[in-house]
Structure formats: structure tokens, C-alpha cells
Image (cartoon, rainbow, N blue to C red):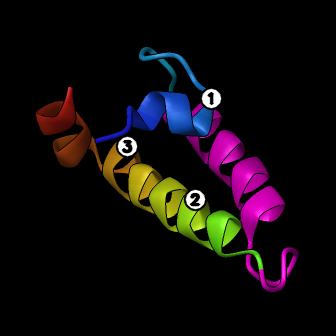
Amino acid sequence: MSDFYELLGVSRNADADEIKKAYRKRARELHPDANPGDEAAAEEFKRVAHAYQVLSDPDQRQRYD
């Protein structure tokens, strides 16, 4: 399993705003509409979205940490 913090490019003590900002930046870079036909980018987009889902929820983030 990938390190969710590393996927988003934030430190382990990042606050919710930093996590959200990093997610939006990575999502724009990897979004399938921005990379048509690039399966690797689509898979990375899914991993980044999952990382954000976990880290943006305080309960899930606490369990992950």
C-alpha cells in the first residue's frame, strides 16, 4: 500500500486545508480528462482520490495513522 501522505505530497502533520489543496493540485494533474488514454494517470488519480478520502475524514485518518 502506498503512503497516502506521500501520494498527496504533504507532511504527516498537515492540516485539512493543506491536504485539500494538495489533493486538488494532484487531481488536476492526473484527471482522466486531462490525460486521455493514459491508464497510468487514471490509476494514480484513483489512488490519490482514495488517499484524500481517508486523510480528509478525521476518524479514518486517525485509524490510518
Q: Secondary structure beneath disc 1?
A: loop
Task: Pinpoint residue 52: horizontal percent, then vertical percent.
Answer: 46, 52
- Depth order, front residue of 20/39: 39
Task: Report which residue position mark 1 lands on.
Answer: 9
Mark 3 surroundings: few (<14), some (14-19) or many (≥20) residues within 10 A: many
Q: Which residue lies furthest to the left in this view?
A: 63
Which of discs 1 and 2 lies nearer the camera? The answer is: 2
Task: Report which residue position mark 2 lands on.
Answer: 44
Callout 1–callout 3 Cβ contact below 8 Å: no
Task: Pinpoint residue 43: horizontal percent, then vertical percent.
Answer: 54, 67
Residue 49 relative to residue 10: left or right: left
**Quadrant in which residue 17 is drawn:** top right
Q: Earlier in the sequence, mark 3 or mark 2?
A: 2
**Residue range corresponding to the magenta coloring:** 16-37
Q: Is residue 11 above or below residue 20?
A: above
- Depth order, front residue of 26/58: 26
